[in-house]
Image (tube, rainbow, N blue to C red):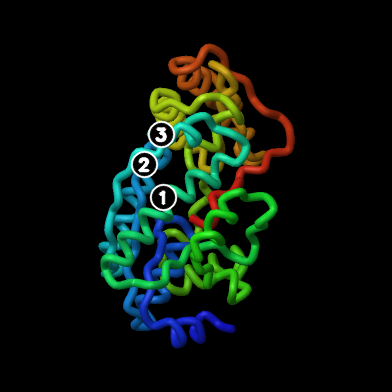
């Protein structure tokens, strides 16, 4: 099946829209194909401000019909307790809300941006999507992340080269309680580092300390900005360390 085939067979559906590479490509492609499509963005404590800004920017630039759903994921005690399968409970919570909103608007099908490069075994949230009957057109059409970035450039989407990003909760060690205060500290640090020129990195939290993960491409920038980086991290955390292991920054969020 091609994506065009999917659109012909499903001329009306909703999209769980995050402003990331995958869901942006899906909703913009559907719009271009004259599909009756609406995007739903869930704004919670786990999403940084720039994600909301990207959603609004894309919607404005491409004439997208979107709705922002505000929710408090930390009100769910299982989510805030941060077990190893936290993503399952979080996805169940937010996609249930999306499905309810979409149903009210007359959409019987809800799609997400999971693609063929995503590994279900590595993402507990996949189970929630399957249980709720969420459809993943990009995965069904065997489109990889590389394909999607290339096609996004053809559509002139500013998200084409956007780094992979997972929610702020993924920065906190499993079984460490997630609080809004910790999330705000992480977002503050990552925003400041982005302004310094870092583009693909994570500020992870272990206890009260921060562990910075960057890609080898930014080692030179880190050496040049070492004192500024230290100041940024130590303003919010008791200690700061650099992770020198091979880093994997594309941890999953079930295609959102």
Q: CA distance from mark 3 to mark 1?
A: 12 Å
Give x and y (percent) for residue 140: 59, 74
Can see residue 222? yes
Residue topped by disc 2 = 44
Bin the neighbour count of mark 1 within 10 Å (Cα to Cα): few under 14, some 14-19, many 20 and up: many
Q: Nearer the viewer, residue 173 or 155?
A: 173
Residue topped by disc 3 = 74
Q: Residue at x 46, y 29 (%)?
A: 186
Label whose residue precedes the other's in the sequence (2 or 3): 2
Bin the neighbour count of mark 3 within 10 Å (Cα to Cα): few under 14, some 14-19, many 20 and up: some
Image quadrant containing the N terminus: bottom right
Bin the neighbour count of mark 2 within 10 Å (Cα to Cα): few under 14, some 14-19, many 20 and up: some
Q: What mark, if any, has residue 162 been given in the picture?
A: none
- The vertical placement of 186 against 114, above or below, is above
Residue at the right extreme, as displayed: 245
Label whose residue precedes the other's in the sequence (2 or 1): 2
Q: What mark, if any, has residue 94 been given in the picture?
A: 1
Q: CA distance from mark 2 to mark 3?
A: 9 Å
Can see residue 195? no
Q: Residue at x 44, y 87 (%)?
A: 8
Assign a secondary structure to mark 2.
loop
Q: Nearer the viewer, residue 251 or 80?
A: 80
Is 211 placed left or right of 193 in the picture? right
- The answer to whether marks 2 and 1 mark residues whose Cβ atoms lie closer than 8 Å is yes
- The vertical placement of 191 against 41, above or below, is above
Q: CA distance from mark 2 to mark 1?
A: 9 Å
Give x and y (percent) for residue 248: 67, 43
């Amino acid at each position: 099946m091609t994506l065009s085939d999917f659109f012909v067979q499903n001329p009306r559906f909703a999209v769980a829209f995050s402003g990331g590479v995958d869901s942006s490509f899906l909703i913009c492609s559907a719009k271009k194909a004259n599909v009756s499509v609406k995007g739903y963005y869930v704004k919670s404590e786990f999403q940084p401000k720039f994600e909301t800004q990207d959603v609004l920017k894309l919607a404005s630039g491409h004439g997208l019909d979107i709705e922002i759903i505000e929710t408090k994921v930390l009100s769910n005690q299982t989510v805030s307790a941060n077990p190893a399968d936290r993503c399952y409970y979080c996805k169940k919570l937010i996609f249930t809300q999306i499905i309810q909103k979409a149903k009210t608007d007359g959409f019987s099908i809800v799609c997400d941006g999971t693609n063929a490069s995503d590994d279900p075994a590595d993402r507990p949230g996949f189970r929630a999507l399957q249980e709720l009957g969420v459809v993943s057109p990009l995965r069904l059409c065997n489109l990889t992340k590389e394909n999607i970035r290339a096609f996004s450039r053809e559509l002139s989407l500013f998200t084409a080269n956007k780094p992979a990003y997972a929610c702020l909760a993924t920065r906190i060690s499993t079984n460490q309680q997630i609080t809004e205060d910790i999330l705000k500290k992480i977002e503050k640090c990552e925003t400041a580092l982005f302004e310094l020129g870092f583009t693909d990195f994570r500020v992870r939290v272990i206890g009260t300390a921060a562990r910075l993960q960057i890609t080898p491409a930014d080692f030179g920038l880190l050496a040049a900005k070492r004192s500024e980086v230290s100041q940024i991290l130590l303003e919010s955390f008791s200690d700061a360390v650099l992770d020198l292991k091979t880093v994997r920054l594309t941890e999953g969020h079930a295609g959102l």
